[in-house]
Image: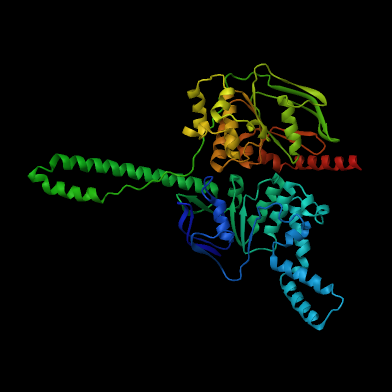
Amino acid sequence: MISANNVTLRVGKKALFEDVNIKFTEGNCYGLIGANGAGKSTFLKILSGQLEPTSGDVVVSPGERLSFLQQDHFKYDDYPVLDTVIMGNARLYEIMKEKEVIYAKEDFTDEDGIRASELEAEFATMNGWEAESDAASLLNGLGIDTELHYMYLRDLTGSEKVKVLLAQALFGNPDILLLDEPTNHLDLDAIAWLEEFLINFENTVIVVSHDRYFLNKVCTQIADIDYGKIQLYAGNYDFWYESSQLLIRQMKEANKKKEEKIKELQEFISRFSANASKSKQATSRKRALEKIQLDEIKPSSRKYPYIDFRPNREIGNEVLAVEGLSKTIDGEKILDNLTFTLNRDDKVAFVGGNELAKTVLFKILIGEMEPDEGNYKWGITTSQAYFPKDFGGEFDNDYTITEWLTQHSENKDVTYVRGFLGRMLFSGEDGVKRLRVLSGGEKVRCLLSKMMISGANVLLLDEPTNHLDMEAITALNNGLIKFPGVLLFTSRDHQIVQTTANRIMEIVPGGKLIDKITTYDEYLESDEMARKRQTYTIQKEEDED
């Protein structure tokens, strides 16, 4: 068990948390949620001991081991992958290293023998003999192949490092597990594995995530940070959302009834306070009026942008025809003879582990890259808007937000442009912010504003939820569901894919395409698709041999 007692954290004059009292118990997975800037990651740092609160303390039950997901991806660059994972249990790793030093001695003494015996006993009680196999199992589950286990962390890619650090946090069955955005940079297979791991994990988990599907799958409780306080709700994320909205509605309805009663009493008092025969009743109503207290409904720190893609023209029956598209990059076949036709009602999610293939296809279809072979043709009634995964170059200039968006709008009226920015939470002075100083989330909201103002009837979005908070992701999800045009998109957000797509395309290893009219969950459950993916993998390995 871990608890926070009267925890307050002040940053300058502002109190991020004030007198927080909360207890996290064994057997529960807590989703820590709140708006951007509410202090989710900061609170995890306080719980893990990385950050001292201004006042109050954190108490961990005696003898319990706490583990947390490291955010410094370069900290272990000089260590082998397996060693890095085992370091998740610091004491076990210390024992292993001390044993190595003792057994390497040429002048092995009796004292060394006694010390080695003590270490071996402690090593055995900590299941040390299974440490390497347990670490390897975690790595394999997260998609880190066995040949990488003995490499140094510096030789791995960024996404592979993230998986190793996650395996480190999970290693050794910690009593308390703190995870800050554990699904970032994970592919869908790794996320699914992590979900199952946490569902079966019997100790205490506290997790911060913007992935609503993930929180719904693993959480038994939600800890909501708002108003500088933390409120616990039983159930998963959807249950929290419904409960919190119901509570606000009930408070508003109760206040409305109280306001009606107040008005009724005030009218009676006003009419009869000067009437001798009614004076006692008027006095009684004054007392009743004084006792009525309206519930305080504080404005939430959560702010939802308004995302609404409205096409300027209706799309025709001919949308897109792709014929024999192929592309090879650095000797690797990224796309191999892709052929498909889009219909006017299609909402297509591109899935699969090869992120480069999806990005390359989008760049070809939007005209930013040429295919090696094949061709494509957009229908004459279509107009396209594109959200690129790498959008850094778009903001490498000195324009203000308003100046930048005005360039992309047919209507150059500043009030019109500011209206779109206001919907996306850029109000007042935010409109004159320079593009260079924007955060990742602000840049994404700018790009979505650009797509809305374009009036396009075909949207191509390559991982649009990166950098967005939960509220913006929810707003985007709703906007895509309502969009009456054609969608082509990629996303790691399971809920967006499941609730939006009616057609799934997977580019498998080797660049081939699986195309299925179905929902995402049905696609994942399809044994036929699993066999096809395995067939393509085997074929690729045979080709390489």
Res 341 → quadrant: top right
User: What is the residue that sits farthest to the front in this orientation?
Assistant: 398
Q: Is residue 121 above or below residue 446?
A: below
Q: Quadrant of the C terminus?
A: top right
- Considering depth in this image, is 521 or 251 the residue closer to the camera? 251
Q: Is residue 66 above or below residue 231?
A: below
Residue lying at 14% horizontally and 39% vertically, measured from the top left: 271
Residue 372 x %, y % = 83, 26
279 on left or right of 332: left
Residue lying at 56% horizontally and 68% vertically, measured from the top left: 61
Q: Is residue 536 above or below residue 174?
A: above
Q: Report whether residue 408 is seen.
A: no
Residue 342 x %, y % = 70, 25
Q: Report whether residue 79 is seen.
A: yes
User: What is the residue that sits farthest to the top in this orientation?
Assistant: 380
Res 364 → quadrant: top right
- Considering depth in this image, is 66 or 439 the residue closer to the camera? 439
Identify the image's colour scheme: rainbow, by chain, secondary structure or one colour: rainbow
Res 138 → quadrant: bottom right
User: What is the residue that sits farthest to the bottom in this orientation?
Assistant: 110
264 on left or right of 224: left
Q: Quadrant of the N terminus?
A: bottom right
Residue 75 x %, y % = 71, 55
Number of numbered discs visible in the structure rendering: 0
Residue 327 x %, y % = 81, 30
5 on left or right of 398: left
- Considering depth in this image, is 506 or 223 the residue closer to the camera? 223
